[in-house]
Amino acid sequence: MIISAAIARRITPVMLLVALVPLARAAASDTPVTEPRCTVPTVLTASPAATAAPPGGIAPRAIAPARTPHPAPAASIDPRLDAMAADAVRLLEACWNARDWDAVAALVTPRFLQTSLGIVGDDWRARAALGALDLGALRIESFGPVTLWSDGRGSVEVRYRRGDGALEQAVAARWFLVAERGVARFDEEALLPPPPLGDRVTLGFGIAADDAPPRWDDPAGGAVPAAPVIALHGANRGRHPRTLHLQAANGKILGVLTLPAYTEADLVLLALPPGAYTLVDAVDNSAALRLVVGDG
């Protein structure tokens, strides 16, 4: 890296450190990397009283959706933000795979849990719901540089897989983040079109209104041939978000899709074995669709 004397006078130690991080990583590409430990920064650790279940079982309330922001390319990015976001990504992955749901709930906001997994409620409810989902290991494949948005938040584009063994849910998303006292927390997930992942079979379904159950687009029902990639393309035409779970015959949840109001997105499964499955509304279990893969 060559830096002119004029530029060097304007570079702070923090800026130089951030600039050198990619070079250091490239130089160490052949060196074994130690897996990050799940250690939540002190500034994100709530008091026990703040995370305890409230007396009387107060009903959880959904968070109002954020106004749709737009990119702010002219905004000045804090040079520390990329490093903060990278630390947050690695820490979230480590804590998820350690099944430390207290830590996971501290690293993200309630809005993130609602928009990514359909979990509504305070910290104690989030911890219980995360453990109950039992979605398997989290593997974050890539994440991009921080972009700033008109509402003051940053974002990174991520690709990740979640599941056990070969059977995984593949997700492409934009993770919005907020910075608090030098630490980044993820604040919202917005799904992006999935990347090409191999031979794919797509089956569409729609939700016509808030009080309507999901319905397959094909009148013949939800039968698809076995394929390396199966995508369930959902369209929510209601005014409220809907979360759906794809369940195996034994009730295990294999994938989660949260559809905000008036949006379309994909639930993508890799190596889904032939068999019968159920696409279930997370709130109303009676609103379910039967999916048959292969001979069923």
Image (cartoon, rainbow, N blue to C red):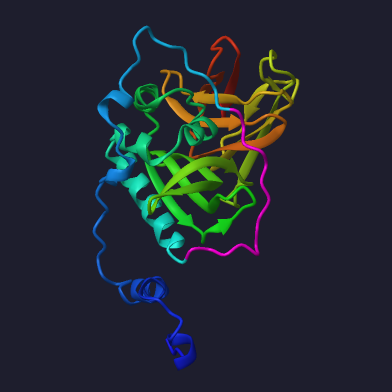
Give the quadrant of residue 49. Answer: top left
Would residue 207 be counted in the magenta stretch?
Answer: no
Task: Name above or below for residue 157 compared with residue 44.
Answer: below
Residue 119 visible in image: yes
Q: Quadrant of the C terminus?
A: top right
Q: Position of residue 291 (x, y in %)?
A: 58, 23
Q: Quadrant of the N terminus?
A: bottom left
Given residues 195 and 37, the one toward you in this image is 37
Give the quadrant of residue 128. Answer: top left
* Left or right side of 245 for 93: left
The residue shown at (35%, 23%) is: 124
Q: Position of residue 243 (x, y in %)?
A: 57, 25
Q: Position of residue 98 (x, y in %)?
A: 27, 39
Which residues are drawn in magenta?
64-78
Type of secondary structure dominating the magenta stretch: loop
The residue shown at (57%, 58%) is: 147
* Left or right side of 135 for 294: right
Q: Position of residue 3 (x, y in %)?
A: 45, 89
Count of residue discs: 0
* Left or right side of 33 for 289: right
Would residue 67 be counted in the magenta stretch?
Answer: yes
The residue shown at (56%, 12%) is: 284
Task: Name above or below for residue 125 compared with residue 117.
Answer: above
Residue 165 visible in image: no
Given residues 157 and 205, the one toward you in this image is 157
The residue shown at (54%, 53%) is: 154
Farthest residue toward the bottom? 5
Task: Name above or below for residue 279 compared with residue 66.
Answer: above
Farthest residue toward the top? 56
Given residues 210 and 185, the one toward you in this image is 185
